[in-house]
Amino acid sequence: MTADALAPYAPRSMPGIAAATTDLSKVYGRGDTRVVALDRVSVSFREGEFTAIMGPSGCGKSTLLHCAAGLDTPTSGSVRVGTTDLGTLDDRRLTQLRRDRIGFVFQAFNLLPTLTALENITLPLSIAGRRPDRQWLDRVVSMVGLSQRLGHRPAQLSGGQQQRVAVARALVSRPAVVFGDEPTGNLDSRAGAEVLGFLRDSVRELGQSVVMVTHDPVAAGFADRVLFLADGRLVDEMTRPTPDRVMDLMLRTSGGESGASGASGARTR
Ligand SMILES: Nc1ncnc2c1ncn2[C@@H]1O[C@H](COP(=O)(O)OP(=O)(O)OP(=O)(O)O)[C@@H](O)[C@H]1O
């Protein structure tokens, strides 16, 4: 049988790709307020890789992350997580996929104040009616250094510790991808470096795939690969980044303005 004859039965995902977008566009508003936040972005996030997304303010980083994570709906194009095309899912199945296959770490820690650290970590599993895999839970908890803090409530933890709880919560269901939107944005540099170290450990030690939006070249230096967006388009990519190389590229591509303070990168038309 020829390869062509087999094609309809071939898996719809490429091996080694945790998530991917194809010709992904997102347009907000209409008429005078029309904003092209993403303009035909095709990108693959590899399994077991730590990817950072950077670019000037307003260039579409969060929109890309939210569409890839099934939190926002594309105007056109498609998003795949593993073998699943998100466009084929109804609301219920999309919610299920987000719960079971995707982990989130946001800038705000989003922990429930009345629950202990352990209860917060296992909450996604409790909601899904699943029991935690004890060995995996222990591994994740010890990796993020929380073994002695499991009975504490968020108010009894530092910001860095709270974000470590959020990282453990994102990892506990062994998702296809963990998406982070400025996960260190609310932390001082030491706590931020710790959290980034744990995210990198989850890639190295647990084979997790992580995709993170950041403005910070130091944070991007923890990643394996950095994607640069401008004007809703993918404009550059760097492997094995260092903070200096990232900063250089940011300065060159934004005409001297850094990502955090750069001019808005989205187009209105
Ligand atoms: N819900 C929305 N309604 C209208 N416009 C939006 C909406 N969300 C984002 N935009 C616009 O889309 C563009 C891209 O926004 P996005 O938040 O993705 O950029 P960003 O690169 O993450 O920015 P920042 O670094 O400042 O967080 C911006 O011009 C923004 O104003």
Image (tube, rainbow, N blue to C red):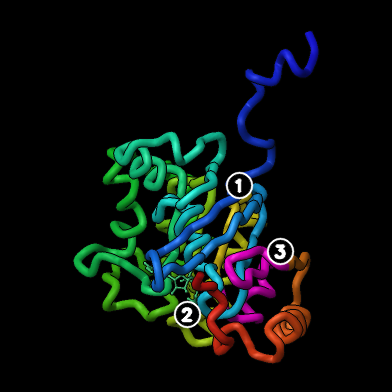
For label 3, count other residues whose C-alpha is less than 10 Å away and answer few (under 14), some (14-19) or many (20+). Answer: many
The label nearer to you, 1 versus 2, is 1
For label 2, count other residues whose C-alpha is less than 10 Å away and answer few (under 14), some (14-19) or many (20+). Answer: some
Can residue 222 be found in the magenta stretch? yes
- Looking at the image, which is closer to me, 133 or 71? 71
Residue 22 badge: 1
Whichever of labels 1 and 3 marks the residue nearer the N terminus, that label is 1
- Looking at the image, which is closer to me, 206 or 15? 15
Q: Is residue 225 left or right of residue 154?
A: right
Residue with the mark numbered 2: 185
Q: Which amino acid does the dot numbered 3 rest on?
A: Arg
Q: Is residue 96 left or right of residue 87?
A: left
Q: Which residues are magenta?
A: 214-235
Q: Which residue shows up at 27% across the image and 64% down it?
A: 116
The label nearer to you, 1 versus 3, is 1
- Looking at the image, which is closer to me, 259 or 30? 30
Q: Residue furthest top?
A: 1
Q: Residue furthest left?
A: 114
Residue 28 placed where, x, y %? 41, 64
Can residue 234 be seen by looking at this rendering?
Answer: yes
Residue with the mark numbered 3: 225
Can residue 147 be seen by looking at this rendering?
Answer: no
| Figure quadrant of residue 234 | bottom right
Under circle 1, the secondary element is strand
Callout 1–callout 3 Cβ contact below 8 Å: no
Q: Which residue shows up at 72% across the image and 13% down it?
A: 5
Q: Which amino acid does the dot numbered 1 rest on?
A: Thr
- Looking at the image, which is closer to me, 182 or 164? 182
